[in-house]
């Protein structure tokens, strides 16, 4: 049996043995709580043979949990010092492949191929939203994403219309997936302890997006414009977001949406109707 990396003692030992100093800039907060690692593996329902993309393996803490569950893991790590460390800490597993690089730049279809896969990660918090958006928008064959994020980000991912924190991230996440907060994680579960509370969010990717729209790009342009100036009425926010005044008036009228409402009150279905009304005009 391999000692679990997810403990304070083993993690400190590895850091010392390799002379590693953790980088705040790269969002390095390593898990030291084996129950949380297991919680992520369980939430992702990892079964032997599942293909899993891990983002930021660090010293291999979560990677080990995924590998023990029998997953076929591909882990992308930006920190150039870590692949050599991972080679050592994960040498007992032949079902792990480390890909050095930036998750926002690597060609994911090239490394993962076309078969369905899951994503599991304790994300670097400085780029959580860009990573989530990149994974969602690229229409990769992802079936399920289980990620550790800042609690405040998880609340935005799961926020409902009318709430102060409902925004473009909420719409994008809920359009593609069914997000659910599955675990609360205190700062003491990491080294170093982050200043914020964390949670594990499970996002099951929908077979079809939550609403059917004619033109997805246009849908997200409307969403971004509506939340771009969230204190303004829809009429003004959409005008400010690059849509023509007459087009906005007609689209709102056609979709039956009150122009004095604010974007933050619209459901996904209403955003879909509104975007489709613009799309009809453009064609
Ligand atoms: N998985 C480990 C764990 O749970 O203890 C480490 C998680 S730590 C919060 C985030 C990891 O992501 C770090 O290892 C960091 O170097 C890596 N990272 C940061 N930016 C990255 C990027 N753009 N692409 C890939 N990995 C990145």
Image: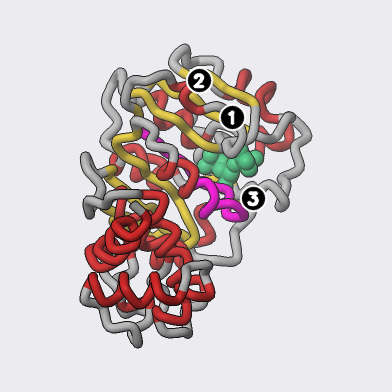
Question: Do the residues bearing badges 2 and 1 touch, measured as CB atoms within 8 Å?
Answer: yes
- Mark 2: which secondary structure? helix
Above or below, 56 against 235 in this view is above
Q: Which residue is mark 1?
A: 106
Residue under circle 2?
Answer: 110
Q: From the Cβ of disc 1, is ligand 1 less than 8 Å away?
A: yes
Residue that extends furthest to the bottom in the rendered view of this protein: 260
Q: Position of residue 217 (x, y in %)?
A: 41, 50
Q: Residue at x 69, y 21 (%)?
A: 84
The answer to which quarter of the image holds residue 208 is top left
The residue lying toward the viewer, choosing from 151 and 5, is 151
Determine the secondary structure under disc 3. loop
The answer to which of 144 and 233 lies nearer the viewer is 233
Q: Is residue 107 left or right of residue 33?
A: right
**In the drawing, does residue 86 fall left or right of residue 6?**
right
Frontmost of labels 3 and 1 is 1
Residue 210: percent from left, percent from top: 23, 53
Residue indicated by mark 3 = 27
Q: How many marks?
A: 3
Where residue 261 appears, x then y in whole percent? 33, 84
């Amino acid at each position: 049996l391999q000692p679990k990396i997810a403990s304070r003692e083993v993690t400190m030992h590895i850091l010392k043995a390799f002379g590693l100093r953790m980088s705040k800039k790269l969002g390095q907060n390593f898990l030291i709580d084996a129950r949380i690692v297991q919680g992520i593996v369980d939430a992702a329902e990892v079964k032997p043979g599942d293909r899993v993309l891990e983002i930021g393996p660090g010293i291999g803490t979560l990677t080990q949990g995924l590998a023990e569950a029998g997953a076929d893991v591909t882990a992308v790590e930006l920190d150039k010092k870590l692949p050599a460390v991972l080679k050592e800490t994960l040498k007992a597993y032949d079902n792990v492949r480390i890909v050095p690089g930036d998750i926002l730049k690597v060609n994911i279809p090239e490394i993962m191929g076309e078969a369905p896969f899951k994503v599991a990660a304790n994300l670097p918090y400085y780029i959580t939203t860009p990573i989530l958006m990149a994974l969602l928008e690229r229409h990769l064959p992802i079936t399920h994403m289980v990620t550790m994020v800042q609690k405040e980000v998880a609340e935005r991912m799961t926020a409902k219309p009318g709430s102060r924190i409902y925004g473009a991230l909420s719409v994008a996440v809920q359009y593609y997936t069914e997000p659910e907060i599955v675990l609360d994680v205190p700062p003491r579960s990491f080294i170093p302890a982050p200043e914020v509370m964390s949670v594990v969010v499970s996002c099951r990717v929908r077979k079809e997006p939550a609403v059917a729209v004619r033109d997805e790009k246009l849908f997200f342009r409307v969403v971004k414009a509506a939340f771009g100036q969230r204190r303004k009425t829809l009429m003004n926010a959409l005008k400010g977001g690059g849509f023509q005044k007459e087009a906005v008036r007609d689209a709102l009228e056609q979709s039956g949406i009150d122009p004095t409402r604010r974007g933050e009150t619209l459901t996904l279905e209403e955003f879909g109707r509104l975007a489709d009304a613009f799309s009809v005009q453009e064609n």
